[in-house]
Amino acid sequence: MAEVTRVAVVGAGAMGSQIAMLAALAGCETTVVDIDEQRIDAALAKVRESVARSIERGRLDAEQVEAALSRLSSSTDLASAVEDADFVIEAIVEDLDAKRALFAQLGAFAPANAILATNSSSIVSSRLADVPSPGRVCNMHFFNPALVMQLVEVVGGTHTSQATVDSAVRLAERMGKTPVVVKQEVFGFIANRIVGAIFDEAIALLEAGVATAEEIDTAVTKGLGHPVGPFALLDMTGIDVNVGIKKLEAQETQDASRGPSQTLLDLEAAGRLGKKSGRGFYEYGAR
Ligand SMILES: NC(=O)c1ccc[n+]([C@@H]2O[C@H](COP(=O)([O-])OP(=O)(O)OC[C@H]3O[C@@H](n4cnc5c(N)ncnc54)[C@H](O)[C@@H]3O)[C@@H](O)[C@H]2O)c1
């Protein structure tokens, strides 16, 4: 397996900018691409702040960061950014049509043997594999914040070649991550699937009047050692975001019982969207 040396990351949002920095830290010449030049500037400024904090905390070495930053460039021109890439990671908006349109462009502009990975949390790569040599298409799912979180789920569909899975695993390891191979394109992959089940059970207990949200969160943090309880986490990620995920889960699994609970729907209708709106399961005071 040839070592990956040139990476293009498409989408300079919360995820893409940090994934690009990881690739540069792994020793790859890396280009981060976005349609919005201002997004790129803002994202790279944030990445510089994050790595500066990591240097202060002794997690990264200043020289290593300096060298990585010299390998990191940005562009708004997709064609030239991917023309000599051997690994492309897509991290644009979570929208199937936008991703399909982008993959069609990647199929046209990137070298025929370049691996094409999507960081999508819920769109499986078989939906994007309508390109020449679909065996090179997979999901490579990082967690937020990508610079800090250890896990990368590498998901291969039936179209994905073993060489592609191996290459994604190897790149994740070079980024200092712990890759886990997911052998089927199941909704939520592994980690989000499990956290989703925890949310469902926590809400079922609350709806049955077994305990308050605070008590359930306390049981999970103090009894299971989770850093944050399910209701605090639902508030952090946003009630509306979670309603969207549950709707998609019901659709993708063709099981209406996996849709959003009445409690989530009621909170969303009341504008109690979690931390961002000042109130969800908890109150966060004036914002
Ligand atoms: N945010 C998370 O917690 C998280 C975690 C894991 C995976 N993901 C996945 O990562 C992907 C990106 O999420 P994010 O939170 O970084 O999004 P974001 O909204 O922060 O960033 C998306 C970026 O993509 C750019 N973009 C849109 N269309 C484009 C195109 N055609 N070409 C180039 N750039 C384009 C936008 O300008 C924006 O800068 C999604 O697929 C999401 O499911 C997100």
Image (spheres, rainbow, N blue to C red):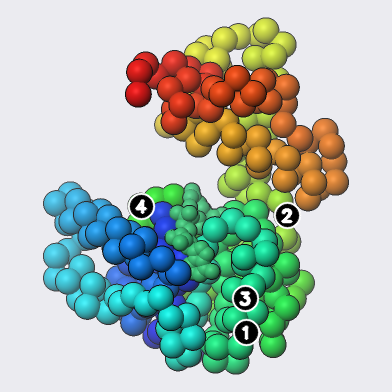
**In the displayed structure image, the side of residue 268 where residue 50 appears, left or right:** left
Q: Which mark is residue 186?
A: 2
Foreground mark, 1 or 2, reads: 1
Q: CA distance from mark 3 to mark 1?
A: 6 Å
Decide if ligand 1 comes within 8 Å of the CB at mark 2.
no
Which kind of residue does numbered mark 1 sit on? Gly
Q: Position of residue 141 (x, y in %)?
A: 54, 59
Note whether 30 is above or below 156 in the view shown: below
Whichever of labels 2 and 4 marks the residue nearer the N terminus, that label is: 4
Q: Quadrant of the C terminus?
A: top left
Which kind of residue does numbered mark 2 sit on? Val
Q: Which mark is residue 103?
A: 3
Neighbor class of circle 1 (other Cα within 10 Å; few <14, some 14-19, many 20+) is many
Q: Are marks 4 and 1 in contact (CB under 8 Å)?
A: no
Which kind of residue does numbered mark 4 sit on? Val
Whichever of labels 1 and 2 marks the residue nearer the N terminus, that label is: 1
Q: CA distance from mark 2 to mark 4?
A: 25 Å
Q: CA distance from mark 4 to mark 1?
A: 31 Å
Q: Are marks 3 and 1 in contact (CB under 8 Å)?
A: yes
User: Which residue corresponds to the image point at 33% horizontal and 59% vertical from the top-left?
Assistant: 43
Whichever of labels 4 and 1 marks the residue nearer the N terminus, that label is: 1
Q: What residue is disc 1 on? A: 107
User: Which residue corresponds to the image point at 62% horizontal and 26% vertical from the top-left?
Assistant: 268
Q: CA distance from mark 1 to mark 2?
A: 25 Å
